[in-house]
Image (cartoon, coloured by chain):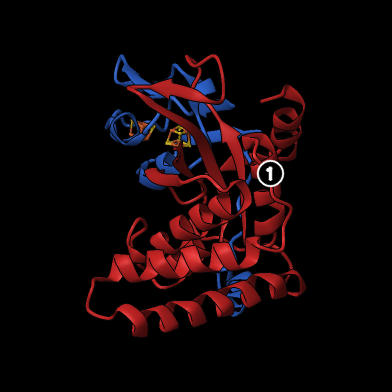
Chain colours: A blue, B red
């Protein structure tokens, strides 16, 4: 897995470090660094918890999302 | 467990996609037409949950849903080929779950093999990618790992027992928005 942390966006809160079950991240100089990217199993809990949206995963399998309402998506497409 | 099947699984779950954080998801994937198979799965599952609830009402939600899932697993897997090897059983299981759940065999970096022996236990890590239970929970704003997840546990255990004739146990390690890590303990 190829994990990128946007160093400018990261606020160094350490939430991803605490939340990742595979201990992929470490805080170094107040910025999160993916030190064990091969241990990532793609749960994306870190994306959900990061307040700065600083994370990017490359080569991930995106699970199906039937739960997202099609009508809501259609409405949002019109305004976003 | 031979490398070929594992490599095939890894290939199926690898992509060149770049996944960025997003404010509001604008897409519902896959296309609505492809949802039918999944929705049938949900309906069947719910029917069995209710039936099991009548049978053992009062014993606690987890017991009920686990039992419903296990019944579903046995019921569906009895039409599949019986296998005594774990690799073959997982292959049968992924065929069985297609359209509702998808998983791959996984191991942490420091483990040599996919079948792990630790503290007297033999187990395999499974990463569940597509999952109707996760989708149902997120659709309703409910936490993962509760009673509805027990249906999947029961389902997998029931199917593995039916296919291999061996007792099995599934433990939750982590639940995430895109994938969940589970431990299949072989007895
Ligand atoms: S996707 Fe999951 S396993 Fe991977 S880095 Fe994020 S929290 Fe850790
Ligand atoms: S959760 Fe986001 S902002 Fe906080 S340390 Fe991790 S990457 Fe940085």
Location of residue B122 by image quarter: top left
Question: On the picture, is B63 further left or further right than A58?
Answer: left
Question: On the picture, is B7 further left or further right than B115?
Answer: right
Residue closer to the observer: B10 or A40: B10
Residue closer to the observer: B123 or B141: B123
Question: On the picture, is B51 further left or further right than B73?
Answer: left
What is the quadrant of the N terminus of chain B in the image? top right
**Residue B145, image x and y in percent?**
35, 55
Taking the spot 22% from the left edge, 78% from the top edge, the residue there is: B58
Count of numbered circles in the view: 1
Residue closer to the observer: B55 or B143: B55
Q: Residues within 10 Å of mark 1 (few under 14, many from 20)?
A: some
Return the residue at label 1.
Answer: B83
Taking the spot 62% from the left edge, 39% from the top edge, the residue there is: B104
Position above or below: A39 against B161: above
**Residue B9, image x and y in percent?**
71, 36
Location of residue B113 by image quarter: top right
Subunit ID for the residue under disc 1: B
Residue closer to the observer: B170 or A10: B170
Regarding ligand 2, which quadrant of the image does it lie in? top left
**Residue A10, image x and y in percent?**
38, 31
């Amino acid at each position: 897995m190829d994990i990128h942390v946007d160093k400018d966006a990261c606020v160094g809160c350490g939430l991803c470090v605490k939340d990742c079950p595979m201990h992929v991240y470490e805080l170094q100089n107040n910025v999160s660094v993916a030190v064990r990217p091969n241990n990532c199993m793609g749960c994306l809990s870190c994306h959900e918890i990061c307040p700065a949206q600083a994370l990017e995963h490359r080569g991930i399998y995106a699970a199906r999302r039937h739960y997202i309402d099609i009508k809501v998506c259609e409405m949002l497409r019109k305004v976003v | 467990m031979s490398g070929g099947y594992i490599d095939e699984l890894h290939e199926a779950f690898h992509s060149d996609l770049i996944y960025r954080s997003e404010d509001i998801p604008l897409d519902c994937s896959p296309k609505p037409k492809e949802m039918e198979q999944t929705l049938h799965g949900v309906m069947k599952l719910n029917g069995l949950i209710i039936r099991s609830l009548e049978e053992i009402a009062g014993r606690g939600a987890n017991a009920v849903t686990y039992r419903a899932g296990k019944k579903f697993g046995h019921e569906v897997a009895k039409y599949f080929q019986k296998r005594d090897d774990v690799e073959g059983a997982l292959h049968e299981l992924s065929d069985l779950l297609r359209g509702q759940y998808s998983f791959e065999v996984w191991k942490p970096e420091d483990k040599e093999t996919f079948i792990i022996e630790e503290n007297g236990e033999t187990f395999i890590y499974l990463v569940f990618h597509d999952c109707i239970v996760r989708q149902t929970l997120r659709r309703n704003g409910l936490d993962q790992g509760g009673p509805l997840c027990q249906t999947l546990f029961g389902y997998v255990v029931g199917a593995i027992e039916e296919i291999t004739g061996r007792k099995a146990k599934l433990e939750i390690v982590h639940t995430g928005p895109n994938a969940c890590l589970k431990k299949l303990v072989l007895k």
